[in-house]
Image (cartoon, helix red, strand yellow):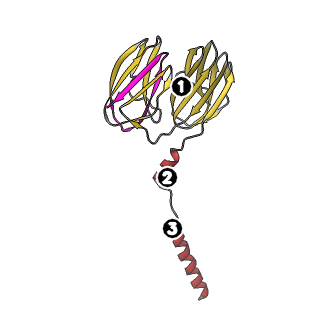
Amino acid sequence: MANKLAASFVGLLVLAVCIIAPTASASDNNAASTVEPATISLSGVGQQASQMFTLTEGLSIFTMKHSGSSNFIVHLLDSKGNQVGISLVNEIGAFNGAKAVGISTSGDYILDIAADAPWTVDITQPRPQTAQSVPVSFSGKGQQVSQFFTLTPGLARFKLMHNGESNFIVHLLDSKGNQVGISLVNEIGAFNGSKAMGIENSGIYCLDIGADGNWKIDISQ
C-alpha cells in the first residue's frame, strides 16, 4: 500500500512540474533575434586582406577611414570568395564615410582592401526597435548612412540637395538592409530636386548615401 501511495505522489509531482514549467514563446524567439551583435573593428596599413569575421543576416553598416592619397577600395567577400554587392568604397585620397549593406546569409566574411596608408573599418549590425518619426531632415558630407526613421504605408516625399561634382546616389533601405524601390536619386554633380515614393509597409528605414559634397535630405509623409 505504501508503494502505491509513493508512486501516486511521484506521478502528481511530475504532472505539476509539466504544468508549471514555462515554454518558449514566439515573442521570446523574436526578442532573441533583435539582439545587436558586438561591433567588429579592423585596421591595417596599405593593401590587405582582413581577418575573417562573422555577420548575421540583416543590416550591416561599415564605417571606414583612410588617410592616404591614392586609391581606397574595399570589397566585401563571403567565405567562398564571392563579392557581396558593389564595393563598399571606391575613392581616391583621404576618406571618412560609411556604407549600409543587407546581409542575406549569416556566415563568415572578409574584406579585400586596396589602400596606400593606414585604414580602419568598424562594422556594426544595428537592430533598431524604435526610431524618430517623419518629418525629419538629415545633412552631411560625402558617403554616409543616415540615422533611422519610421515610415507608414502611403506616400512619402524626399527632397534632396547636393553641391558636389561627382555621383549623388541615394537608396532607401529597410531595417534589414533591403533596398526599397529604385534609387531616390542617381545624378552627377550639383542636384536640387525631390522624389515621391509609395511606402507599402510600416517600419524603420535609413538612407544609404553616395556623394562627394555637402548634401541635405528632407523626408515627409
Q: Are marks 1 and 3 in contact (CB under 8 Å)?
A: no
Q: Quadrant of residue 2?
A: bottom right
Write down the region rendered in magenta: 198-221
Residue type, label 1: Ala
Q: Which disc, if any, is residue 28? A: 2
Q: In the figure, 67 relative to 38: above or below?
A: above
Q: Is residue 162 magenta?
A: no
- Quick check: 108 left or right of 164? right
Q: Percent position (x, y) of residue 44?
A: 68, 24
Q: List the residue tagged with mark 1.
A: 98
Q: Residues within 10 Å of mark 3 (few under 14, many from 20)?
A: few
Q: Farthest residue toward the left?
A: 154
Q: Which disc, if any, is residue 20? A: 3
- Quick check: 205 left or right of 9? left
Q: Farthest residue toward the right?
A: 45
Dominant SS of magenta comes to: strand
